[in-house]
Amino acid sequence: MFVRKLVEKASKKPGGNSDIVKGSDINPRVVFHHGIPSGCNLLAYDSIQKLLATSTKDGRIKLFGKDNTQALLESVNAVPSKFLQFMENQGILINVNIRNHIEVWDIEKNLFADVHPFQEDITSFTVMQHSPYMYVGDSAGNVTVLKLEQEHIVQMKYTIPYSVSHGNNPTEVAGDTAVMHILPQPTAESKRVLIIFIDGIISLWDIRESKSVYTVGGNPLQSLHQEGKKVTSACWACPFGSKVVVGYNNGEICIWSIPRTEFPSESSTQIAPISKLNLGYKLDKVPIASLRWAYADGKANRLYVMGASDIASSNLLQVILLNEYTEGRTIKLGLQLPEPFVDMGIISSFSEQSKHRQDCFLLLGNSGHLYAYDDRSIEKYLLQSQSKSSPSLPRDIMVKIPFVDSKITIAKFITQNTHMLSSADEDYLLLAKSFPSLLSFETKLKDGTQLNASRFTGFSKVKNLYITGHSDGAINFWDLSCPLLIPIISLKQQSEDDLSLSGIPLTALFFDLNSRLLVSGDQSGTVRIFRLKPEPYANVSSFLSLQGSTKKGNDHIIQSVKLSKVNGSVISVNINQSTGHLAVGSSKGYVSVIDIEGPTLLYQKHIASEISTGIVSLHFQTCSFHGFDKNILAVATEDSSVLALDSDNGNTLSTSLVHPKKPTRALFMQLLDAHDTLVNRSNILNGLDLIKGSSTVDDTTQKQFLLLLCSEKAAYIYSFTHIMQGVKKVIYKKKFQSSCCWASTFQTSNDLGLVLLFTSGKIEIRSLPDLSFIKETSIRGFTYSTPKPNSFSDSSICSSCEGELVMVNGDQEIFLFALSLHNKSFGLLDFFNSTYQKDLIVSQEELVAGCATPKEKKKGIFSSVIKDIVGSKPKNVPEIETADTRESIEELSAIFSSANFRVDAENTNHQTVDDDDLQLDLDDIDIDIDMDIPGEKPKEQNMLAALNKEKLTSKFMAFKGKVMKQMKSKNEKNSGKQEEQQDEKVGQVDEIKKRYGFSSSESNVAKIAQSKLQENTRKLQGINLRAADMQDTAQSFSSLAKEVLRTEQDRRNS
């Protein structure tokens, strides 16, 4: 204790910590995430950008784009999402979490842009595509309109109140007022929107008229004491918005007819649906969790139905043929699911390899796994079933890390040639575009296997080499120079004659590129020593199929394979490069030293232990012992005991083991050169001299080492001299607050450091040898569970000497973690993290494929006139409304910016702004119209027009004055209450936004005012341009009318 305090006291001298690893030298972070994140619960898809998004239960969002690009976003609040939807082709993703916070994500920059705290409980959310507007339905039955302005959400004055949209007899039962779905009507998105309430009422809302023009559904015959059926899902089932499918909590599925015009001829009191689908859900009382409709040009329109159940069955997800005219019998397909599901979606993409469109039906399981079906095979099955043939059932594929068909049990990560990647960037970019994507079907038809088209000539050409040992005995090599996991070669050879897989899990790996030596150990105690041939290797197809082997095996790479056997499973291996001796530690406590040239077993030493006998780490070292250089083998056991052996003969140098008072599972052991460790060098050595009783510092500065031992509960720094003597003297110690699951050292430009990973996903960085805290971070979504005896963890972790970590979480995701300030370890990170294509040129084929509803071709003004004259109309063609998108959005901007209903503080009934005393009396406006024949009095007509304009303007100004006075008198009554409520709401919003890292609303007033001023200026400019266009058009028509009149007069005179 005295010595430790003396050393710690000496280490606190001024200037003593000048060379330690500093926080400014490192930046711990996840640089790339590959695969499907754990805990997924929602899907979203941008059909134009071909972007897939998944949200998780812990607030993460994963994006999948073209050319194997992927990006991981993390919200401030680690809570599940309610709704997730793209603003298609606008670079915006909207996420609504369970706290009713509406988050705006800029997916072009992968940044969090804004948050809008919603006051009510959000029960439905819909983006009006190709516009900046969003509909939000709440539990009270009201619909709010939001607008995205410069990546900030603004609440519009336009509202759709429950009392007006629901009908004449709104439901008063608590919990029966929620808006469950808001569906803009196809081909009339800017005119009408369908609102579906939880009690079954379906209301078609006219946006311009601000009223419900059609109402259907509900439970009018339901008793007040009986609980009626609730709406759980809905979707359109017609490209023109004339049919909607609604699913209920009792398993019913109904198809309702919806009018396509502003003035429906159907009775507004219609109750019965046009049809009901009997799929067995009602019999089993399975609620309809989700509905999706796929349009296929009227030939194979499909409805995907997913039931909500905790038990997987063949009837839980069904696909039925739903065309305009269907047969008497229902054509359906029941998919056999491996587990219950929470969400589903249909995505489309154009394959670069096959040059044709690929449709994929995705299912998201309760476990977070993602399953994919080839949607073409589903369509083919239904069409063949229609002809009463016997088609083959579609088969699902679980989306997982490419090429990994067996669990990774051990891994190594080796980095080299840090400046080599710049010349190979173009090669990796080309490979990324031709490499199979995560959801590619064509290269996964044979049990998930894929073939790599790249060529492999040698390991020296690889900057980052990732080696994995698997549960089936295979050894796979990967190029991890860029974030894309590129397979190099797979070794399955077990001996000189046996080329097949052993089926026994690998438990230890060692690879040295300079000596071309590869050593593997498995659970049965077999040690395999591979000698590789000199490079370059033969230019052959690199990655062999994981499902089998070839007759030739890996003869072009492997020179020889030698086997040795030890007692127990192989846990640790290490090699002495100077002597060529291989040390092997087993699970039964045996240390075996083998001459790899034979191989010949030199000796075997059993380390007795009371608790756990496994040998977790072995290190060769030459150091001074009793004044002589001696070859030492440092040994660490699973119960955190350490000792030293004479590596030449296996004799112990002391009779006792060094171990902590409370043994815990050891994770990592490393020998540190006290002179290469720049932290408090002189202070530590002086402390060691005092411990030894030596008076000569020069003797100790020659061969002095420290031993680092990390366990689940603490980290220790010992003097290796003490370990050799069997003396327990701890120089530094750090107890952990939580359980540690992995540890390793890393090298910076200045010094060594220690990285610790905890079971919760937290990572700590500490300096060596004093174990002082430097930085910490957390990897959200990564959890480690301690494996049971004779089993393996679902997580695989390894690191390079520079501190890059590769963490594999099951068979779904890979985290690439870096400590350095600059991204030099992995190349092309910016490219692979960019999922959004800013300069995307959408082809007509992709535009039609990405659009669920077919659009009628717009006609010009003259073709419309000709159609009216001729009077022709195609037969059996539905009336489709078409409108200019830009003009519709501009019109919506004016409509949504003004309040369509006002709320009186004393009377909660909603009244339209145009009612009562705000109505315009026609008697207040005098319009003089001259009915003379054009051309007879042109001058007087112009004068009268000018006078009429002045008179009309004055009348409107007078009317405006009346309205403003009435509005002002009413607003003054409630101004005090409204100001108090507004201040309270603003304070709550500011507090929530501060949690997300945004400044308060007061500091943004100037920016908001400036943006609104700019928007109003743009609107005025647009009005001026349209006015000028209208004036030019009027003049043109006036000239044409005069010409026609002159021609007619000439004809009469003649």
Image (tube, rainbow, N blue to C red):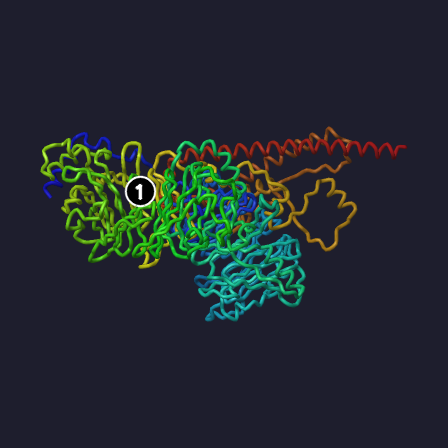
Give residue 712's position: percent from left, percent from top.
Answer: 25, 51
Total residue callouts: 1
Please give the residue where the numbered disc 1 appears in the rendered image: 580
Residue found at x 72% / y 55%: 876
Mark 1 lies on a secondary structure that is loop
Tell which of 1042 and 951 is nearer to you: 1042
- Please identify the quarter of the rendering in which residue 755 is found: top left
Q: Position of residue 941 (x, y in %)?
A: 72, 32
Quadrant for the N terminus in the image: top left
The residue lying toward the viewer, choosing from 430 and 654, is 654
- Identify the residue at horizontal 41%, vertical 53% (top origin): 473
Quadrant in the picture for residue 802: top left
Frontmost residue, 167 versus 923: 167
Looking at this view, is 246 or 586 the one in front? 586
Residue 470 to residue 539: above or below: below
Q: Is residue 144 left or right of residue 929?
A: left
Q: Split into 4 quadrants, where in the image is the C terminus? A: top right
- Tell me the kind of residue under disc 1: Gly
* Whether residue 660 is visible: yes
Q: Is residue 1036 above or below residue 657?
A: above
Left or right: where does residue 378 sit relative to residue 532? Answer: right
Would you say 234 lies left or right of 139 here?
right
